[in-house]
Amino acid sequence: MPLTMTAIATPAGGKTTTSSMATTTMRFEKRASMASVSSSSQVGASKAVSVRGSVRCGAQRARGVMPVMAVSTTRQSTMTAVTTMRRSTTTAREAIVARAGGGAVEINPNDPPEEEVFDMTQDGQKRRWGMVIALFVAFVLCNLDKVNMSVAIVPMAQELGWTTTQKGLVASAFFWGYSFTQIPGGWLASKYGGKVVLFWGVMLWSFGTLIAPMCAALGMPALLASRFLVGLGEGVAPSAATGVLAKGVPPSQRSKAVTTAFGGLDVGSLLGLLIAPPIIFRLGGWPAVFYLFGALGFIWGAWWLMKFMNDSSTDMKEEAVVGGKKALSIPWGAFIRNKQFWALTVAHFTWNYFSYGLLAWLPSFLADAMNVTLSKSSFLSILPYLSTVVVTALIAPLAGELESKKVLTRTQIRKYSQTICFGGGAVMLTAIGMIVNSTPAAAVTNQTIAAVVGLLSVTFGMAAFIRTGLFCGHQDLSPKYASIMLGVTNTAAAIASTLSTFFTGYFLSKTGGNWAYSLFFPIAVLQIVSVFVFLVWKSDPVDFDKAKTA
């Protein structure tokens, strides 16, 4: 550097003066201070050395020697500052990529603050939670359009003269479409974004709901096709919503957001059972429930399209770092080799076997084993779902508080949630089975009914912990592949839904109508197995892309 050559020992009578040396030092100081804001302490140290060197310069100039200390020290500090700045930038970049599916751990000192990855301003929080509420409403509509057929099928069968077999076909047509779009829905959400896929999913199932009365008038094939469309649309919803939450909600708020959004399913089931009968009786018969619920879906779609679908401010800031979208290659082999992925799959299978098995058979159980009238059994069936809604409202903020205050780690919250959900549920269902086995239908009293319904309500209340366990797990492992992973595990869950309805009826025929061995004990066994399988769980993010090439 020319400046260094000028600074080497200068005679006392030379042209180099104290003022020129000070100017030289100031130039170096300016360059050092511009090198990195993050290295301010190092730059400050270099400034102090430079000032001391300038003072000594005036004294030593009288002896005819100009020291090089000020120049060389400042230059070295400048290089150190630049290196530190580059290292800090690289570390932050790698950490942000890790949040999107890279190899970070649960508590990673290299992770940038959430403010660097998400919009944590007051306005950003408002938009984010507005989006979560919109997801909640979408899931309310999801189960409204699922339950509406369960209620409307009774007057429809009477009016259209359906046989039991035809009623079974209509009830199962939904699951044909629902099972078909689990993995494709996850792939689409991973490739094109959950916001877009969720929008078109809601539009599709709302259209299928809206045309159901017209299709029923055309005949059974047309009605089955409409219910198939409803299943297709609803099949993409869990994966799409998981993708939206994974990319839009900070990890510290994940438990609360997932519980809130997916809690709409429980509210939808409860609301559908409550309002569908009055709508049918007072608003023009069973077609009214399809017209009303279908129209609500299109209203939601307009809201989502205008407010959230194209709003990238609610997404994590990864695109600018990663450098644009690339062709999506799903690491299937890495999924299969991962123990946590299998724990999620087993838990999801068990959850659907439990939830859909009881949803399908609970009214029949209360009518057959408890001697409860059909109208009263429908009312009593609502109470367990009401319990789920109440507990969900409580655990959503609780899980967030426990994690934010570091009372429990994220891994502990997931494990404890699954243990309460399945372990506690297995105990309650076993108790119900023992009551049923020891009480013949003729000996059932009001106290027996109260005990069974009470235990069922406790079971469903503990089941609410699934929202802070299983349904957060996919996002914990990899926000990047959360949608496709949920699509895979939900495919296994959809199979479980079909198996639970079939095997419960099969076991009833083989055991002479024993509800304990046909419904409650099989579910309890599955739940116990799932608790032990989930002990392998860790909420550490997994870099499936690296695992794919390993």
Image (spheres, rainbow, N blue to C red):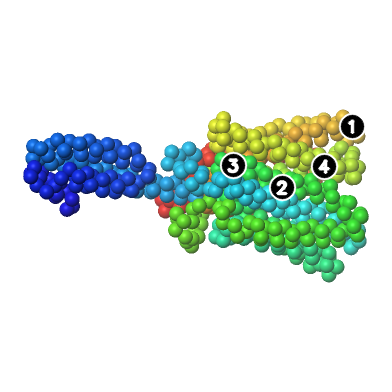
Label 3 residue SS = helix
SS class, disc 2:
helix
Q: In this view, does 309 lie to the left or right of 539?
A: right
The local secondary structure at tag 1 comes to: helix
Residue 48, labelled with which disc? none
Marks 3/2 in contact by CB < 8 Å: the verdict is no
Q: Is mark 4 on a helix, strand or loop?
A: helix
Question: Which residue is labeled 4 in the image?
Answer: 381
- Label 1 sits on residue: 446
**Place of residue 535 in the rendered image (x, y in percent of width and height, measured from the top left):** 56, 36
Tell me if mark 3 has few (under 14), some (14-19) or many (20+) residues whose alpha carbon lies within 10 angstroms of its own: some
- Tag 1 or tag 2, which sits nearer the N-term? 2
How far separated are the C-alphas under marks 4 and 3?
33 Å
Q: Work out whether residue 455 can be spotted.
A: yes
Under mark 4, the amino acid is Ser
Sequence-wise, the earlier of marks 3 and 2 is: 3
User: Residue placed at 83% from the left, 70% from the top?
Assistant: 218
Name the kind of residue labelled 3 in the image. Answer: Gln
User: Which circle's residue, 4 or 3, is located before the other in the chain?
Assistant: 3
What residue is rendered at 91% in x and 34% in y? Answer: 442
Instruction: Name the residue carrying label 3.
Output: 253
Q: Which mark is residue 264?
A: 2
Can you say whether 1 is above or below 416 in the image? below
The residue mark sitting in front, 4 or 3, is 3
Q: Looking at the image, do the residues carrying marks 2 and 1 touch, with CB atoms under 8 Å apart?
A: no
Q: Which amino acid does label 1 sit on?
A: Asn
Q: Residue at x 82, y 48 (%)?
A: 273
